[in-house]
Amino acid sequence: MPLNIPNALTWARIAMIPVFVGLFYLPDSWMPIATQNLVATVIFVAAAVTDWFDGYLARALGQTSAFGAFLDPVADKLMVAAALILLVQLGRVDALIAVVIIGREITISALREWMARVGQSGSVAVAYVGKLKTTAQMVAIPMLLFNASLYGVDLRLAGEVLIYVAAALTLWSMGYYLRRAMPLLRDTE
């Protein structure tokens, strides 16, 4: 495992997860819920920015590695899954939405791993619909974590709409990737 700046940022993102989750287990006397919401939102946004930044640095510094390519999406999925589970517990996201999004991530990760093993990883490379899904959920989750109005905009309502959009895009993108893989799945029966 090469220890370089991009991988260190990815490890830092993973290390943020217990802090992020732990915030919501603090007593209100230590940190009121509004402050918990704000700090959790800042952590999640920092993780999202770090995700973009570590990929940029890996390419710019020539520090890409197979381990980094593996660890980066794992860190992303762990953070999103932790956030969705917390939001379900807090009553801000329906459990079905969380199951759809997390289930898709597991399914597509397994599909990509299998496709890589049969030498066809390009068949399930990230598509535009996948990028739209990621954008929708990465905007919706901080809004739902913040759970208040900002400059007159009800971020919770906007987040609820966007998380449903993200779930629809999740199903669409999963269908897209499965259709792309179907010829290979049939050939290996």
Image: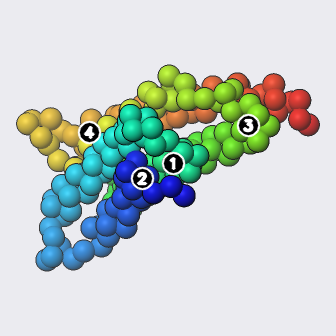
Write down the residue under mark 1: 68
Q: Residue visible at 89% across and 35% down? A: 188
Q: Amino acid at mark 1?
A: Gly
Q: Amino acid at mark 4?
A: Leu
Disc nearest the viewer among 4 and 3: 3
Q: CA distance from mark 1 to mark 3?
A: 19 Å
Earlier-in-chain disc, 2 versus 4:
2
Disc nearest the viewer among 2 and 3: 2
Q: Amino acid at mark 2?
A: Asn
Label 2, residues with CA under 10 Å away: few <14, some 14-19, many ≥20: some
- Helix, strand or loop at disc 1? helix
Q: Amino acid at mark 3?
A: Met
Quarter containing the C terminus: top right
What mark, if any, has residue 157 been given in the picture?
4
Q: Which of the 4 image quadrants contains residue 158?
A: top left
Q: CA distance from mark 1 to mark 2?
A: 9 Å
Write down the residue under mark 2: 4
Q: CA distance from mark 4 to mark 1?
A: 36 Å
Instruction: Tell whether 146 sits left or right of 19.
Output: left
Earlier-in-chain disc, 1 versus 2:
2
Q: Which of the 4 image quadrants contains residue 115?
A: top right
Instruction: Tell whether 24 sits left or right of 18.
Output: left
Label 3, residues with CA under 10 Å away: few <14, some 14-19, many ≥20: some
Can you name the residue that lies furthest to the front here?
Answer: 62
